[in-house]
Image (tube, rainbow, N blue to C red):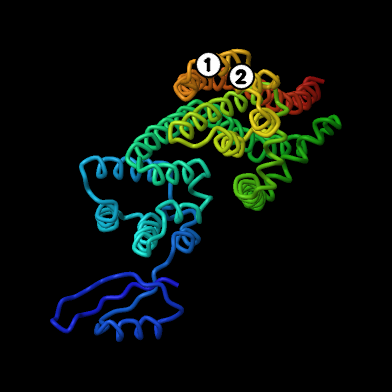
Amino acid sequence: MRFHYIASKPDGKIVEEDFEAGGPAEVLEYLANQGLKPISIKVVKGVAEVSRGLFIFKKTITVADKVFLTKYLALMLNVGTGLLKAIDILIADLENPAMKALLMEIRGNLEKGQPFYITFLKYPRYFSPVFTNLIKAGETSGNLEKVFEDLSVSLEKEQDLRRKIKSALTYPIILLVVSFLILILLVSFAVPRIATVFSSANIKPPLFSRIVISAGLFISDYLWLLILVLFATAIALWYLFAKTLLGKKIFYQFAIKLPVIRNVLKQIALQRFAATLSSLLRAGLPILDSLEITAQTVGYGELKNSLIRISREGVMKGLTIGEAFRREAVFPRVVVNLMAISEKAGHIEDILLVLSDFYGKEIETAVKTMVNFLEPALLMGMGVVIGTIAISVIVPIYQLIGQFGG
């Protein structure tokens, strides 16, 4: 457990530090041995402990936080500021409690002589294997400043890509929500009032109309209960598919079978493959390690398995990178050819960087295509539902007109 103590020296000077201990008594014993008089002792929560309490309404570690961290550290190292000093400045200025707890843990580990990357390794939820291994490579080679610069650029591109995808999907989501609200309005308010008219006129609508009207009456009677159930179900499904590994796998297996979405997922995986492998090679990691790490981050089953085969059954057994990639049909021909050519020229990481930018633009096109498909599909679906309700009401109205006409 980590404690933060404030104590005074015999000459009156105040010291403030973090200390790993089994309990407050151990901290007091340490202070006594150092000739320090305790003023305050508090437990310091680690980033994992802090983030457990952050959930929905408080902040956790976001991509924007990681962009800021890497860009700031790159800048500070570039102007000659020591790593510990830079971290101390960040701790004093940051307001995000999770980030502050993380940096305090990093500082404590550095003071103990542990490597910089060790702390990130403990929190895979926030820091991917690529992030951790890049920092490890930069620390080992003494090129940490360059690694931070590359990481900040890579994270900014990732953030920008996510923003564009969210922006493209905003209109279909609004369309879906508005259509759902219109449907609720029709079924829960309009249909029951029309049903009252039919009942007072002693008209027995056709079976089809009676089913729709009965559904409308049921929804009208239990509207708030149904909204509560739908809300609880939405939260449960979000937690299942967004927060659990099994849920993510189920959702992924379902999404990848849909032709338009499958194309988007593959483009995203190819962009991630190119960006990740380029970053790892530029940081100085061996090709086999780079391929293995990249395989774990692409998030696309076929591509992951192909990269593992390229590493273990291709490059490891003496094949050139170009030969190993040619054996995998999942990679587009342009990728295979460029990998073979760049290997001979000796600048694979540069070509991969170009491929990453290329697939970033391809993703934008693929997402637009998906949205162009979703919009008319949603409109047609809602048109069918609303048309069904309209027909179920119009038929009895004709009966009513006929009855009064007769």
In the rendered view, does 135 fall on the left or right side of 294?
Answer: left
Q: Is residue 192 left or right of residue 11?
A: right
Q: Secondary structure at mark 1?
A: helix
In front here: 25 or 65? 25
Q: Eyeballing the image, is 284 above or below 109?
A: above
For the N terminus, the image quarter is bottom left
Q: Is residue 121 above or below residue 143?
A: below
Q: Secondary structure at mark 2?
A: helix
- Residue lying furthest right in this view? 207
In the image: residue 353, left or right of residue 304: left
Q: Residue at x 78, y 27 (%)?
A: 396
- Whole-percent x and y of residue 158? 45, 33
Disc 2 residue crowd, few under 14, some 14–19, many 20+, Cα 10 Å: many
Q: Residue at x 58, y 33 (%)?
A: 291
Instruction: Please give the name of the residue rendered at 52% of the width and 16% of the height, measured from the top-left corner.
Output: 344
| Mark 2 in CB contact with mark 1 (< 8 angstroms) | yes
**Residue furthest left in the image:** 11
Q: From the top left corner, tell me how far across and down residue 347 is, in percent.
A: 46, 21
Position of the C terminus by quadrant? top right
Q: In this figure, which residue is indicated by the disc labeled 1?
A: 344
Residue 307: x %, y % from top left: 64, 31
Q: Earlier in the sequence, mark 2 or mark 1?
A: 2
Q: Provide residue 270's location: percent of width, then percent of height.
A: 57, 25
How far apart are the alpha carbons under marks 2 and 1? 9 Å
Q: Is residue 15 left or right of residue 342?
A: left
Q: Amino acid at mark 1?
A: Lys
- Tell me the residue that label 2 is attached to: 322
Q: Amino acid at mark 2?
A: Gly
